[in-house]
Image (cartoon, rainbow, N blue to C red):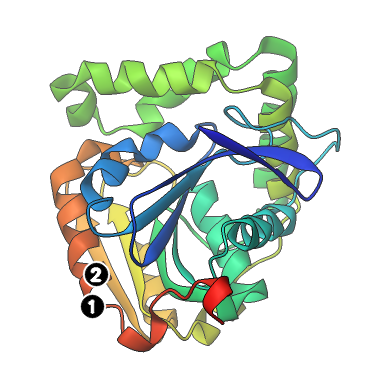
Amino acid sequence: MNAALINGVSIAYRDQGSGPAILFIHGHPFNQSMWDPQVAALTWKYRVITYDIRGYGASEVPTAEATTLETMAADINALLDHLNIHKAVIAGLSMGGQIAMAFAEQYSHRLSGLILAATFPQADTPEAAKTRLAMAERFINEGTCIPGGEMIPKLLAPASIKKNPDLALNIYKMIAHTPPAGAAAALRGRARRKDYTASLPKIAIPTLIFIGTEDAYITVETAERMHQSIPDARIEIFEGIGHMPNLEATDRFNAILHDYLAGVSPQHVTQDLNNL
């Protein structure tokens, strides 16, 4: 594990393999280890970067009351600078997907591809924002273990839990080790986020969308609308899978990743800043 001072905060990251770069953004309330199966599958051919979002995992918990998506996107931009990467495929799941959309809007020139898994572009409704802020307070007052345990049945499809109880346990462990203040700050930031729907038609690079039919947070219809809005988009629908397709259906997820990455246009290939 490496660490770098990114926009005033110590960010933990891993940089493995060589070749075109792909950077993975984890969801809430997890850490970069949620992408371990993808790291193992891709590093033989690609340069794979995972990192802990500020306030999560081994990264520093910020002092700000709220961490916005724009701040998180700026961290990725600075991390790419630190790693001397000009362009990369950016992949995010759930909150990570929303960060990826914020990055695509602010730093489109740095994208060689975009992967959006189990995510949606809309801003919170007033009711949803109120619920998210209440959850932030629960994280502060109760820690991550109790609310985290309640999330498991929503994160994974029932069949996934029955088939692989160890997966549910590993996800719970990730949540239990998440710093409450970091998660709360991110929740507060997401409660006030903008709507990225209007920016989707402006995404001009190949985009891959993943959605599970048993996702408790995002409907297939929402993912289909994203698919229709982005000019060069492909959607993969996972039957019987919940909010964590990369972990619930790892082999299929990885196979689709390989196929997508192989098809990213040569003009989008990663450039090292030292060679510009």
The residue to which callout 2 is attached is 260
Tell me the residue at 33%/68% (across/down).
208
Q: CA distance from mark 1 to mark 2?
A: 5 Å
Tell me the residue at 62%/57% (across/down).
76
Q: In terms of depth relative to the viewer, which is nearer, 136 or 2?
A: 2
Q: Is residue 4 left or right of residue 220?
A: right
Q: In terms of depth relative to the viewer, which is nearer, 213 or 231?
A: 231
**Which residue type carries mark 2?**
Tyr
Q: Is residue 80 left or right of residue 158?
A: right
Q: Secondary structure at mark 2?
A: helix
When the figure is inspected, residue 93 is found, relative to residue 210, above or below; the finding is above
Q: In terms of depth relative to the viewer, which is nearer, 41 or 61?
A: 41
Picture coordinates of residue 135 (x, y %)? 66, 28
Q: Are marks 1 and 2 in contact (CB under 8 Å)?
A: yes
Q: Residue furthest right?
A: 64
The residue to which callout 1 is attached is 263
Q: Is residue 150 left or right of residue 233?
A: right
Q: Quadrant of residue 64?
A: top right
**Which residue type carries mark 1?**
Gly
Callout 2 environment at 10 Å: few (<14), some (14 to 19), or many (20+)? some
Judge whether residue 26 can be spotted in this image: no
Picture coordinates of residue 78 (x, y %)? 68, 59
Which mark, by number, is residue 112?
Answer: none
